[in-house]
Image: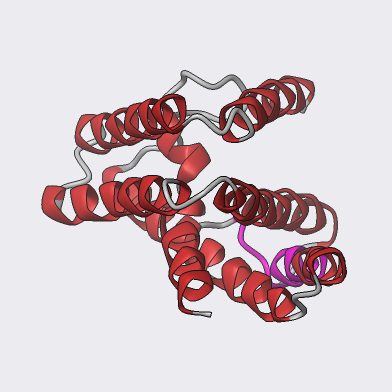
Amino acid sequence: MIKRLLTSFVLSAIILFIIFSYNIWIFSLSIVSICLFSFYEWKKNDFKNNYFGFLLIFNFGFWSIFYTSIDNSAYVFYGLIILNTACFDTFAYLVGSKFGKTYIAKDISPNKTLEGFIGGLIVSVSLGCLAGYIFNMYILIIIFAIGSISAFIGDLLISYFKRKSGVKDTGTILPGHGGVLDRVDSHLLATPLLILIIIML
């Protein structure tokens, strides 16, 4: 747990620096690197469906770079999108570990519970309330809730491929977390979806 928390702290600091440097080149290079590492792990673990994996991973990369290239304010909302998914993930894990009894998809991911999902969703909605108050955009409550659901589906999707390939983690590069794909799985669906919703508002 300590190793996991320490890695999370370091990753959070790096992500904050990248996002709030407001530099499209640093941001783009970072996103492309993440996508390349993720796709490498997809192929290394023999997940099959390489075209689907490529589209899933690089769709995340495309919309991330496209959105933040609009203007500097987009970095703030991008940061909120990433923060929402990270908070959902963290609290779903913590609540599920402590109180989880009702399994959602035990054959695919034995650690996913209804209690954990609800715990993560409550935190996301709370974050949406706070962000809605700060930016006077209360629709963010609904957007963050949608983000939580899509983050859960994205996580479950990668868990399905891991289960089919018989692997627990996609890599070992991130102590306590596994591989890059293990870390971004929840973001692959949530980030492009929320970007599209925000753009259409």
Judged left or right of residue 162, residue 39 is: left
- Expressed as whole percent of the image width and height from the top left, the position of residue 29 reads 36, 26
Q: Quadrant of the N terminus?
A: top right
State the predominant SS element of the stretch in magenta: helix
Judged left or right of residue 123, residue 158 is: left
- Expressed as whole percent of the image width and height from the top left, the position of residue 80 reads 67, 53
Residue 129 to residue 66: above or below = below
Query: In percent of the image, x 80 and y 64: which residue is there?
Result: 131
- Expressed as whole percent of the image width and height from the top left, the position of residue 69 reads 42, 46
Residue range (magenta): 111-123
Residue 75 to residue 171: above or below = below
Is residue 8 in view? yes
Judged left or right of residue 19, residue 122 is: right
Residue 103 image-quadrant placement = bottom right
Query: In percent of the image, x 47 and y 18: which residue is there?
Result: 173
Is residue 108 in view? no
Residue 154 to residue 16: above or below = below
Residue 4 belongs to the span the image colors magenta: no
- Expressed as whole percent of the image width and height from the top left, the position of residue 167 reads 37, 38
Judged left or right of residue 165, residue 105 is: right
Query: In percent of the image, x 25 and y 29: which residue is there?
Result: 40
